[in-house]
Image: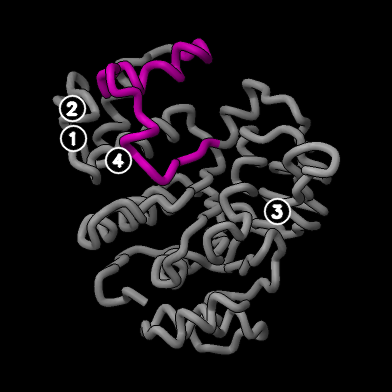
Amino acid sequence: MKTEAITIKTRAEESMNAQTMIDVRHLNLHFGEGNKQNQVLFDVNFTVGKGEIYGLVGESGSGKTTVLKCLAGLFTHWQGELQLNGTPLTHNLSPARCRQVQMVFQDPYGSLHPRHTIGDILEEPLAIHRIGERERRISQLLDKVGLSRTFRDRYPHQLSGGQRQRVAIARALILEPQVLLLDEPTSALDVSVQAEILNLLAQLHQEAGLTYLLVTHDLGVIAHLCHRVAVMQHGRILETLPIEQLVSGKADSPYTQMLVQGSQRYSREMAQLVAVF
């Protein structure tokens, strides 16, 4: 784990509210039709409490990001039951749902329009939802994510990777959602910048009481930011455990134990062993 490079100074240690914010029951998803149909999610079940930071970890292709996209409304042909704050989600993306849950994508450059200024990028959601006081909201949010108001007139290519990710986080927060879906939010950044973004996410979580569903490959990120973690493989959740149990090496699943060992040291033999699971 990259524990020496990640220095989260703030973390919510208080117990989470008993209220469930995200409830996923028997989530299944297929792509294709007929003989070419391929199932990618198999009966996925988990709950996330209000104010909790919940992690999804697993190898590439395990279905982590697919779960996020179902919750975000980017995939609409899922089967099962999804609820946000006690309200069942339909297969249609409503304005109310967009204001309740937002997603921060892995690639901050690819997720920002290259020909729009930062001010335009942040103003667009406000215009779509007909929210007023746009100048004040944009200026306050830039300050909150650690960017000066002079960034409003810049374009994404004029920003560093860390600055672009701060803009992506600001865009996700501009509608004041209750839930942030975080898809590998630091994987495209240098290690030193990763720590800054994780610190920012921890600070925003404490200030606004947000609920996070975080996807990552990095168990160091999970250990420093999350309260609980679900381990996924081949579209299924193998186990869910408190972060203390993961860090202490007391996972039940052999696959989870293998992931922990692989994150602590790399060898050709370890890589081959993980590949056969």
**C-alpha gap between disc 2 and disc 3:** 38 Å
Residue 244 in sight: no
Which residue is drawn at the image coordinates 62% and 52% (left, top)? 50
Labels 4 and 3 touching (C-beta < 8 A)? no
Taking the image as shown, residue 26 lies to the left or right of residue 243, namely right
Q: Which circle's residue, 2 or 4, is located before the other in the chain?
A: 2
Q: Which residue is mark 1?
A: 159
Q: Nearer the viewer, mark 4 or mark 3?
A: 4
CA neighbours of label 4 inside 10 A, class few (<14), some (14 to 19), many (20+) = many
In this orientation, which residue lies closer to the viewer: 203 or 167? 167
Q: Which residue is mark 4?
A: 166
The answer to whether 187 is drawn above or below residue 125 in the figure is below
Q: Which residue is mark 2?
A: 151
Q: Nearer the viewer, mark 1 or mark 2?
A: 1
Region of the chain picked out in magenta, as a range: 102-131
Labels 1 and 2 touching (C-beta < 8 A)? yes
Q: Which circle's residue, 4 or 1, is located before the other in the chain?
A: 1
On residue 19, the disc is: 3
**C-alpha gap between disc 1 and disc 3:** 39 Å
Q: Nearer the viewer, mark 4 or mark 1?
A: 1
